[in-house]
Image (cartoon, rainbow, N blue to C red):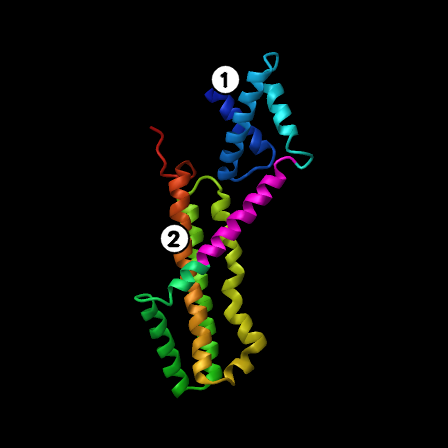
């Protein structure tokens, strides 16, 4: 009969992962599940073995880098999935009724370009988009700080989007004159697309946050132990 680990031993496995530099709770959960299953199998096959010996044998199978490769692979998978989600939401902006938001943004920009200097409108649009994306990131930061008590790689990978918030300013810094010299239709389209990307990021953030809360409620401060 397969011997199951006790609650105390499971707690030891969590502590073991933390001591080996696994700071993300969701990665800890996956590793503890794998370690526990492998240890139980080892104890079943080797009656002379014990918990500590089995743990040492299982950990040795991860190689000289320990859990490092697992963390790296998990981070890449999360990053890839979230970018796919972001792009999926972005594409949905071109379908009704979401398309109405894009049309309103485009018409507003085109109207401004018809009455004011193109470079000035482009600069105003860039700064506005930067402030919008920065406000999302700041609100997100305080939301996570207020609600979470454990780090999740599922949440941490969202900060890879921070560099994107500077894109409107980069465009004006390196290509501002070229953009301002283009047809008003093209200028309005460029900044509309940037605006929709930022709005899509906001939607992506909400979905990822809700998914994290559902999958790992223990990582949130309002989690109550029954």
Q: Which residue is mark 2?
A: 206
Asked whether the viewer can see residue 182, the reply is: yes
Which residue is at the far left? 97
Above or below, 215 against 168 in this view is: above
In front of the other: 134 or 205: 205
Asked whether the viewer can see residue 220, the reply is: no
- From the viewer's perspective, tell me whether residue 185 is left or right of residue 173: left
- Quarter of the image with the C terminus in it: top left
Whole-Å distance between the Cαs marked 1 and 2? 42 Å
Is residue 175 located in the magenta-colored stretch of the structure?
Answer: no
Above or below, 15 against 100 in this view is: above
Q: Badges 1 and 2: C-beta atoms under 8 Å apart? A: no
Checking the image for residue 2, the label placed there is 1
**Circle 2: is it few (<14), some (14-19), or many (20+) Cα within 10 Å?**
few
Is residue 71 located in the magenta-colored stretch of the structure?
Answer: yes
Q: Quadrant of residue 104?
A: bottom left
Residue 179 location (% of width, % of height) = 52, 80
Which residue is at the far right? 64
> What is the secondary structure assignment of the residue under circle 1?
loop
């Amino acid at each position: 009969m397969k011997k199951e680990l006790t609650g105390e031993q499971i707690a030891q496995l969590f502590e073991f992962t933390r001591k080996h530099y696994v700071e993300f709770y969701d990665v800890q959960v996956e590793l503890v599940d794998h370690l526990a299953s492998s240890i139980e199998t080892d104890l079943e096959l080797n009656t002379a073995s014990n918990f500590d010996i089995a743990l040492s044998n299982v950990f040795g199978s991860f190689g000289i880098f320990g859990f490092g490769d697992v963390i790296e692979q998990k981070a890449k998978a999360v990053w890839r999935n979230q970018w796919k989600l972001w792009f999926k939401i972005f594409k949905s902006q071109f379908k009704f009724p979401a398309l109405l938001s894009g049309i309103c943004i485009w018409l507003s920009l085109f109207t401004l370009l018809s009455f004011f200097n193109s470079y000035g409108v482009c600069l105003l649009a860039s700064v506005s988009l930067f402030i919008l994306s920065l406000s999302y990131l700041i609100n997100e930061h305080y939301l996570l700080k207020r609600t979470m008590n454990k780090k999740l790689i599922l949440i941490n990978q969202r900060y890879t989007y921070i560099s994107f918030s500077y894109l409107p300013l980069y465009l004006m810094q390196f290509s501002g004159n070229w953009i301002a010299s283009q047809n008003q239709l093209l200028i309005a389209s460029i900044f509309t697309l940037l605006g929709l990307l930022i709005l899509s990021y906001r939607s992506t953030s909400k979905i990822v946050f809700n998914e994290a809360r559902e999958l790992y409620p223990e990582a949130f401060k309002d989690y109550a132990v029954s």
